[in-house]
Image (cartoon, helix red, strand yellow):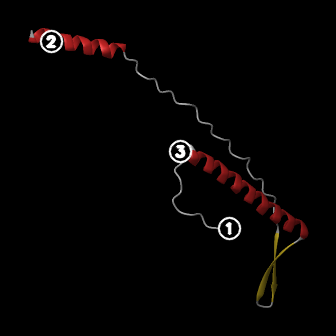
Amino acid sequence: MKHFFLLGITVSIILVSCTTTIPVVTQQPVYVPPLPPRVELPEVTWSVINVDTNTYFALDAESYENLSRSITDTTAYITKLRTIIYSLQRTNLVPAVTRKPASVW
């Protein structure tokens, strides 16, 4: 009798395990945003002026505009990269930075 009871439990466990469905976990594709285009920095020509014991660095108007444009373009590029990094941190593809970034201003 004891053997029939164990056989009945074994058969019922096998039947129950065969009828249960195993959930299939599918991973959704993660959108990785493209990097912003590279920054093309225009050439800046510096002039060095020595007067007595003092040294001065000078720019002409065109070089000054190029330097200003370079700084503006670099700032925009860094802002776009920070936005991409933030979105990747939200999807846990990039670990979050634990320290507070330094302020630019």
- Circles 2 and 1, Cβ within 8 Å, touching? The answer is no
Up the image or down, 48 lies above or below 95; here it is below
Q: Which of marks 3 and 1 is in front?
A: 3
- Within 10 Å of the Cα at label 2, are there few (<14), some (14-19), or many (20+) other Cα atoms? few
The disc, 2 or 1, on the residue closer to the chain's N-terminal end is 2
Quadrant in the rendering for residue 70 = bottom right
Residue flagged by tag 2: what amino acid is it?
Phe
* Quadrant position of the N terminus in the picture: top left
Q: Which of 56 and 8 is in front in this view?
A: 8
Residue flagged by tag 1: what amino acid is it?
Val
Position of residue 97 measured from the top left corner of the image (x, y, whole percent): 53, 57
Residue flagged by tag 3: what amino acid is it?
Asn
Quadrant in the rendering for residue 2 = top left
Up the image or down, 66 lies above or below 8; here it is below
Position of residue 36 measured from the top left corner of the image (x, y, whole percent): 72, 47
Q: How far apart are marks 3 and 1 (CA)?
A: 26 Å
Task: Please indicate whether residue 55 sits to the left or right of residue 7 in the image.
Answer: right
Up the image or down, 43 lies above or below 59; here it is above
Q: Distance between the residues labelled 3 and 2?
A: 51 Å
- Within 10 Å of the Cα at label 1, are there few (<14), some (14-19), or many (20+) other Cα atoms? few
Task: Please indicate whether residue 61 sits to the left or right of residue 11 in the image.
Answer: right
Q: How far apart are marks 2 and 1 (CA)?
A: 77 Å
The disc, 3 or 2, on the residue closer to the chain's N-terminal end is 2
Q: Which residue is drawn at 70% across and 70% down?
A: 105
Which mark is drawn over residue 92?
A: 3
Residue bearing the label numbered 1: 104
Label 2, secondary structure: give it: helix
Position of residue 66 measured from the top left corner of the image (x, y, whole percent): 84, 63
Residue bearing the label numbered 2: 5
Q: Nearer the viewer, residue 14 or 43?
A: 14
The disc, 3 or 1, on the residue closer to the chain's N-terminal end is 3
Q: Which residue is drawn at 19% across and 10% down?
A: 8
